[in-house]
Amino acid sequence: MSTLSRADIDVSSNGIARAAGGARVDLVLVTEMVERGAKVLDVGCGDGELLRLLSETRDVDGRGIELSREGVNECVAKGLAVIQGDADTDLSNYPDDAFDYVILSQTLQATRQPRIVLEHMLRIGRHAIVSFPNFGHWQVRLQLLFAGHMPRTDMLPFSWYDTPNIHHCTIKDFRQLCTAVGVRMEKAVALNAWGSPLRLAAPWWFWNLFGEQAVFLLSRRD
Amino acid sequence: MGTTGPSSTDFKTGKPWGLGFPVITIRDMVRAQAMLLDHLGIESLFTVAGGSMGGMQVLQWAASYPDRVFSALPIACATRHSAQNIAFHEVGRQAIMADPEWRGGRYLLENTNPRRGLAVARMGAHITYLSDAALHRKFGRKFQDRANPTFSFDADFEVESYLRHQGISFVERFDANSYLYLTRAMDYFDLAADHDGILAKAFHRTPARFCVISFTSDWLFPTSESRAIVQALNAASARVSFAEIVTDKGHDAFLLDEPELFAIVRGFLDGAGKARGLGSES
């Protein structure tokens, strides 16, 4: 992965999972990867926090898709351009190159077909930004190894029987998917359990063990 | 009742148009509105909003005059009238035409009025505006002003009495021939058909911001119809919001006090106002 630079992103969070403005650090990281004035689709946009952040700090033309009706109606009432829809079925309705960035924030693990979703994202958008909880984090590994139950952490608070997350992956797994799909990894950031970015010089195995979540900026391989 | 209709006077004969009035379409209505705006010197509209047939007009506005529509709010509508909806309309029209007082549409000349036919048409249509759940909640099987059924054809049930009232009061404010023409205009509406069968072409490069709204219990214009609008707008890369509101009030919900509808419309209009550089009132 010589083309990949693990981004040096300045989040002065000092171990706090929220950045100065009060926004979630992972959302701030995503925001930093988006060019000003870009056209953005946020897949699984929840209550619209990222879209709001993007329009306030990056002046983007933002759109969203959200599965839950409550989330959608909340977003629309905030004046955001959001529709009710499913990442697994509705991305095929969008034409090629409709967006500069297609973002999947903390949603990859909840899709039925992560690979197809990723392929659609890079068909619809020139870039894709994916953030996800790292299932290779040491806490997750230790819980399964020693406690012998499905891991529950701050990032993964659900019981196995009522979780929306059906396709967990590690940072290593995700990199392999990117290789398989043939996308270019432009930037990557891993955050530790306190929301601070891991040292850039650290090797991938270190990221995979100590990164609680990761954010990847991807683009099409031309 | 609109502007000019079958009860207006034909300037050539000095008599009401009746069925001599040409059948009009949703596109004709929108063209007439645009001509009025031309006359008033209004170049573009901040928002075009409407429900049901009004929603069809909203979609037609966006398709016919994309540069004159800044934002569009189609509520509880569709890009084409479904076979089931055409069927309901036909029942209503047949009820009017079966009334001997209709006189082949010449009732104004002959000083009659097809009240019963129009009332029956309205009763049938009114059922389609509600929902099974709402009818059950409002009326159930309750009797009207009586403890026991009369075993006759009186309006024993509350729901019957309600429908009869709806039919009778409608006659006071609506012209029967206008009912024929308006239902026909909706039947002929098919936005995709005007664009080589591809709905997305109707919205090609539209600069407008859209907010599409549907209601869970609306079976006249179900959410699937709104979804088709949204898909076409996405395919056209339009800026679109879409919300489905949970209610048991059926199609009529867009006319009623639905706080979530108001919150969504307010949010959409505020956002559009900011984008247009207008100050917010609040």
Image (spheres, coloured by chain):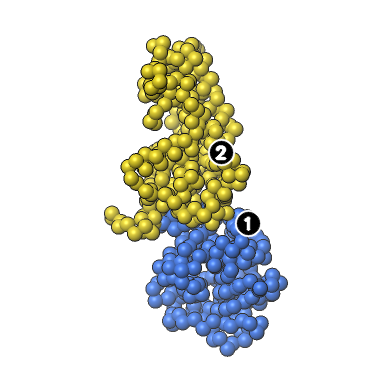
Residue A71, labelled with which disc? none
A85 to A30, vertically: above or below = above
- Where residue B264 sits: x, y (%)? 41, 50
Chain to which mark 2 belongs:
B
Q: Which residue type carries mark 1?
A: Ser
| Camera-nearest residue between A209 and A151 | A209
Chain to which mark 1 belongs:
A
Element at badge 1?
A: helix
- Residue, x 38% and y 22% (percent of image)? B11
Q: Mark 2 against mark 1, which lies toward the viewer?
A: 2
Chain that appears blue = A
- Residue, x 28% and y 54% (percent of image)? B281
Q: Which residue is mark 2?
A: B190
Mark 1, residues whose alpha carbon is within 10 Å: few (<14), some, or many (≥20)?
A: some
- Would you say residue B74 is visible in this rendering? no
Q: Which residue is mark 1?
A: A92
| Res A217 quadrant in image | bottom right
